[in-house]
Amino acid sequence: MESFKAVLGLVTCIVAVSLVHGASVSVSRNITTKPTPEPPSSGPRVDITLECIGSSSDLSYYIKNQVNWDFKDSNGVVHPITQSFYAATGATASYADSNFKAGRFEFKYETNKMTGFYQFILLIKGVKYSDDGEYTCTLIAENKTVADKKTLKVTVVHPVDSVMLTLYDSMNNNKLYTSNAPVTDSTEAIPIKPGSFRVECQAKGSNPAPKVDIRFDGASIAMSDTGDKSVVSGRPSYSKTLSVTQDVAAKDMDQLFSCDANIAGNHYVTKVASIKVRAIIDTPDFLCDNLTRSVGDNHVEVKCILLSESELACDKVTWEIAEENFVMHVDDRHQDPERKYGILELTCTPINSTSLSTSLIVHQAADPHFATVFYVIYDGGPKDFKHAVIINKQAGRRRTSISRKRNEPPSDVDYPVTPLVKDDQLFCQSLGTGLDGVVVSRSSSDLMTHTMHTGDIDHGTTGSMSDHMAAAILRSLSGDVTGHNMTGRSPVMSPVMSPVRSSH
Ligand SMILES: *[C@@H]1O[C@H](CO)[C@@H](O)[C@H](O)[C@H]1NC(C)=O
Ligand SMILES: *[C@@H]1O[C@H](CO)[C@@H](O)[C@H](O)[C@H]1NC(C)=O
Ligand SMILES: *[C@@H]1O[C@H](CO)[C@@H](O)[C@H](O)[C@H]1NC(C)=O
Ligand SMILES: *[C@@H]1O[C@H](CO)[C@@H](O)[C@H](O)[C@H]1NC(C)=O
Ligand SMILES: *[C@@H]1O[C@H](CO)[C@@H](O)[C@H](O)[C@H]1NC(C)=O
């Protein structure tokens, strides 16, 4: 017996010298588990096994040295659990004591049958949320220094408690709507104005951190898988607030914001909150004056101002002639297929982001124009906003083609140099009765224009000139005038003032 001990001692000594240097331990993989259900009768008990395995099969190595398990809980407090082959003892061992006494912890050491390596096994029975934390296995060398140490994480999962989706007006960050549940097919959409929105999703209560995914009409627009940790009644509880800005266009259908939140893995059903919206622009106000004009009047401008609470854009403006299947776009000239209305020109100018001015310009008023309702139409996405305007026929005497209603602001319309539509030439020729002598000048016109508007034109000059005037104007427009660069801004009415005034 003595000799055996001596031999063992010698062997131990040799092994310690040769093996402790570079010795190590490894631990089993991180564990993610649900807790034992509460009450325990509602489901099977959950037990977990933590293993710390030495790098040597030589038992004596571990006798000379020491392997310890300890546990760092959610609050960061470290509790010794085992020391060498035994449950921890001493001043800091109350956690180990109570769990071993309660039969929750079991500890054993044995050789691994596969590798022959020694292993230190901690069994935790009836896993609870409070078992969530880090379990560290430390190998302490004979000289009391730490030779190696490995940690395994036990995550006792908890579902997302709540998910809250909030829609904010991104301009002034007003909260518009909040939801903590998914919408159903029958949920009424929230009416919103198209524009930019901030969408915020808050998921709370999970362990580990939730994966949060904000979607707009099914497509992910923001994602996160991190969170802020806190400890709620002894268990880790993560929360995450994720925010993203999204543009919502006006559409003839409901659009859906949703937020999915869940922890990784298939432990729990994903929690969803969603908000159904329908983006519709505010009905614009149409401020349009119905005009009163005479046959032959030139450049009859039907002007409408559109005002809205929502943004307005000129590319959403069209005009129509009632009962004609004929849509006219702004910044273009149009000739109706039947040529009843002559050349119609459309302009549109933004006033500011929520208002614009659009005009339909009749180059020369004729009977069909008076018997017609013109519609100015704003494409509001899901619906069109439509407003009727008419040109009333002046009763009694005719006014000259160039006269205007008193106080009407001077026309500021630019006639672009781009050639008229191909029908123009016909249109012009049909009017033409060689007024070649009329001086058509596009320069030095401002003063003239102004003079005209001070009023003596409206007193009624003879109507016979008007068609000739029109012809002259149209000819000038269609490019008869040479030597002038017609891209410049030039009020078109002014050239004919001179002859009219002289006819008084
Ligand atoms: C303790 O022993 C280890 C392993 O033999 C060695 O690497 C380390 O230097 C020693 N430390 C001290 C302070 O002696
Ligand atoms: C185990 O968990 C820890 C802490 O969360 C982590 O740093 C480590 O990478 C994990 N190990 C494995 C093998 O997943
Ligand atoms: C835009 O212009 C209209 C018309 O001049 C005005 O009534 C409105 O207050 C303006 N809106 C903004 C946002 O400037
Ligand atoms: C202009 O005429 C249309 C069509 O008759 C009418 O609906 C509208 O009220 C009139 N607008 C004004 C400002 O009188
Ligand atoms: C007219 O003016 C435009 C822009 O200033 C210029 O590009 C063009 O060459 C000019 N045409 C003539 C005929 O002068």
Image (spheres, grey):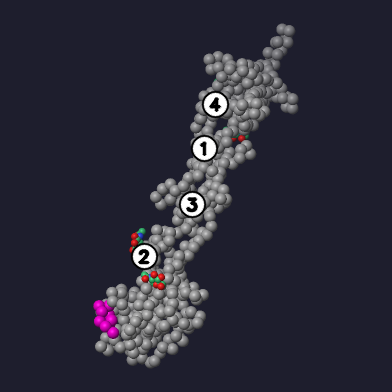
- 496 vs 190, left or right, is left
Quarter of image, ligand 3: bottom left
Please tell me the numbered disc located at residue 351: 2
Residue drawn at x 59%, y 27% is: 128
- At label 2, the amino acid type is Ile
- Choose the circle earlier in sequence order: 4 or 1: 4
For the residues labelled 3 and 2, the Cα–Cα distance comes to: 30 Å
Q: Are marks 2 and 1 in contact (CB under 8 Å)?
A: no
Query: From this viewpoint, is residue 342 visible?
Result: yes
- At label 3, the amino acid type is Ile
On screen, residue 368 above or below 168? below
Please tell me the numbered disc located at residue 204: 1
Q: Is residue 367 magenta?
A: no
- 148 vs 474, left or right, is right
Mark 2 sits near ligand 3, with its Cβ under 8 Å away: yes
For the C terminus, the quadrant is bottom left
According to the picture, the residue beneath numbered tag 3 turns out to be 190
Residue drawn at x 70%, y 16% is: 11
Q: In the image, which residues are magenta?
A: 452-460
Please tell me the numbered disc located at residue 73: 4
